[in-house]
Image: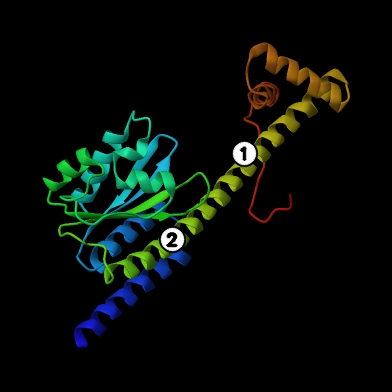
């Protein structure tokens, strides 16, 4: 009873760590490294753990508890590369492709992914569990566990894995939402800076040519097309040429209207 209570306390402590990360972290890699480390130390059987995300360049291991998990992941990417059905490379790729749990209870007896099985048996891996991290559409992920004994995923370990995977999914969604907000803020900042430079150039053209704003903008656009340069760069050159100073960028702060 005492041992069971101690194990439960460790699991609860690990989940508290993940919950704290949900509200505090802004670094995707750091957050996922915590997920891999917590899975490795908390899941019964002490598996090597990794987190894979599919990027625009293909699957990538973004965190691993150690070299074993990283090597087993990379092996699957290599085996799956160029195959018509990439998921044939291994269980991690199958999970990424179908966003479903994929288990190998005993690699020595399992007939799937033979090339992968032969290689990881030599590394001491006997069973594998890969769990989907349903982050959001277009960014599938997987939590991968590599056990040195058969039946690593069982009635004792699976509830723990599922809890960690659920927390990891929430964590990733939160971090990616923050990243989206940061990108939006940066895009707004760039847009405002460009607008400010263009407005300064338009004011100069209107004063020099004695034309309305619409005509000044048309002149600026024609110069941009003729020189094959961005509108902002043409505008900046006009401002600097007339004033002798670099144009003043616009100021953007989060919470500004519009």
Element assignment for label 1: helix
134 to 243, vertically: above or below = below
Residue occupying image coordinates x 66% and y 38%? 191
Q: Quadrant of residue 87?
A: top left
Q: Which mark, residue 190? A: 1
With respect to residue 123, does 215 lie above or below? above
Q: Residue at x 17, y 51 (%)?
A: 109
Q: Which mark is residue 90?
A: none
x 21%, y 44%: residue = 71
Q: Considering the image in quadrants, where does the N terminus appear? A: bottom left
Pick the front one: 72 or 233: 72
134 or 258, which is in the foreground? Answer: 134
* Image quarter of residue 26: bottom left
| SS at circle 2 | loop
Instruction: Characterize the local packing of mark 2: few (<14), some (14-19) or many (20 or more) Cα atoms within 10 angstroms.
Output: some
**Which residue has dot 2 on it?**
25
The correct choice, above or below, for 104 with respect to 167 in the image is: above
* Residue 46 screen position, x and y as percent: 20, 64
What is the C-alpha distance between the residues marked 2 and 1? 25 Å
Q: Is residue 172 above or below residue 118?
A: below
Nearer the camera: disc 2 or disc 1: 2
CA neighbours of label 1 inside 10 A, class few (<14), some (14 to 19), many (20+): some
Tell me if residue 65 can be seen: no
Query: Residue 151 at x, y = what percent?
Result: 21, 61
The answer to which quarter of the image holds residue 3 is bottom left
Residue nearest the viewer, comparing 140 with 243: 140
The answer to which of marks 2 and 1 sits earlier in the sequence is 2
């Amino acid at each position: 009873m005492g041992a069971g209570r101690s194990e439960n306390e460790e699991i609860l402590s690990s989940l508290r760590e993940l919950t704290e990360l949900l509200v505090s972290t802004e670094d995707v890699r750091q957050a996922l490294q915590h997920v891999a480390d917590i899975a490795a130390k908390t899941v019964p059987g002490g598996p090597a753990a990794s987190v894979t995300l599919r990027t625009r360049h293909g699957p990538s291991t973004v965190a691993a508890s150690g070299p074993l998990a990283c090597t087993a992941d990379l092996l699957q990417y290599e085996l799956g590369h160029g195959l018509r059905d990439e998921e044939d490379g291994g269980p991690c790729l199958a999970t990424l492709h179908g966003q479903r749990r994929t288990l190998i209870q005993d690699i020595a007896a399992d007939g799937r992914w033979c090339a992968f099985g032969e290689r990881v048996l030599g590394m001491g891996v006997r069973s594998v569990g890969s769990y989907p991290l349903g982050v959001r559409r277009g960014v599938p992920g997987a939590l991968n566990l590599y056990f040195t004994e058969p039946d690593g995923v069982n009635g004792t370990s699976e509830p723990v894995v599922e809890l960690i995977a659920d927390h990891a999914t929430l964590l990733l969604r939160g971090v990616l939402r923050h990243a989206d907000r940061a990108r939006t803020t940066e895009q707004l900042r760039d847009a405002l800076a460009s607008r400010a430079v263009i407005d300064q150039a338009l004011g100069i053209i209107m004063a020099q040519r004695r034309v309305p704003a619409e005509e000044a903008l048309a002149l600026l656009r024609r110069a941009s097309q003729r020189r094959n340069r961005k509108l902002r760069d043409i505008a900046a050159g006009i401002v600097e040429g007339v004033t002798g100073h670099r144009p003043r960028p616009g100021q953007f702060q989060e919470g500004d209207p519009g």
